[in-house]
Image (cartoon, helix red, strand yellow):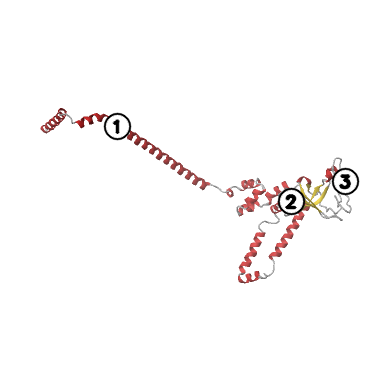
Amino acid sequence: MLLYLFISCFSIIFFIKSLTLKPLPPWATEMRLLSPWFRKDVSFFLSSRLIKNILGLAYFTTVVSKMSLKKMSFTSKVDNFEEVEESAMSILDLPDLVLECILERLPPAALCSMAGVCSSLRSRCISDHFWEKHMKKKWGRIIGPAAYREWQWHIALRTRKDSSHLKQGKPKGLMRVLSIVRPSWWIKSKVDDSSNQCSLPDDSIMSWFLALETGRFSFPAQVYNRENGHVGFMLSCYDAELSYDPRTDTFEARYPPHGRRAVAVENYVPWERLRAPPFDTSPHALHISDCLNELRPGDNIEIQWRRNKEFPYG
């Protein structure tokens, strides 16, 4: 074993020594001169490649880490959204007292919109409890007992028309042919008509409020005079039938005819010139006061004008 090792080492030493003694060929000399530059280029190339690989690996690691963080954040957001979605509550889940407080603070337009959301909210939003406040706030100053009585007559007349329409006899003409071919079609059309007409109770305050707001209902009230700007005339009032114009936020006043005078119409009457009649008395009748014995110094009184052939009582 030792002999084999000695022979191997001796042969290697002899080979190296022979290389140093022999002259190198010319191409080897050139290679020896070029070798430092070659080593420098190779080392620079290898080092640049190594740096590029390290930077690329670092960038890839950063991108992967950012993507993983984004994925984790997105996953957490999705989880949170699912948790919020699962834990979200409807407005109907609120206690009745809280829901009523919310509905009481809604303006009329928002209350109407809320009534169209679902049947449960509709039954709450059309309640007179909410609309009575809106009616008093906007219309209470110019709506009196006479206007309420006119509204009751208006409801009764409309109900009578609707009932007579639903109680019509057998269909005629083409409708009769269609009712013979398909009787269910005629019955369904009648049911649909009745359901559309009865979508809102006529005797509700909401129905009355909407009729006033849209100008579909005319009501009696009194209009302050403005003739010539005279103080005496401006303190006087005339009975009139008013209808609201929502486009201009003013009223159209129709003064009742009397004697030879025709119906006088005045447009663009502002709110400031209107009031509810203090007494439920016709402008063509004499009002008899029953409180003269209760007058005290400092009380304000109103005097009814004496009528003539051209003007009613004022």
Which type of secondary structure does the marked residue at label 3 adopt? helix
Q: Which circle marks residue 41 in the picture?
A: 1
Give the position of the N terminus as an image quadrant: top left
Q: Amino acid at mark 1?
A: Asp
Residue 235 in sight from this viewpoint: no
Label 1: which secondary element? helix
**Amino acid type shown at disc 2:** Tyr
Between circles 2 and 3, the one closer to the viewer is 2
Residue 46 spot, x, y in % from top left: 30, 34
154 and 214: which one is in front?
214
Q: Secondary structure at mark 2?
A: strand
Is 118 placed left or right of 247 in the picture?
A: left
Tag shown at residue 244: 2
For residue 44, side relative to residue 219 (left or right)? left
In the image, residue 24 lies at what x, y percent? Answer: 18, 30
Report the amino acid beneath label 3. Answer: Asn
Local crowd at mark 3 within 10 Å, few (<14), some, or many (≥20)? few
| Frontmost residue, 137 versus 89 | 137
Lateral position of residue 279 relative to residue 65, left or right = right
Q: Is residue 35 above or below residue 87?
A: above
Q: Of all residues shown, which one is farthest toward the top?
A: 21
Taking depth in this image into account, of 293 and 300 the one nearest to the observer is 300
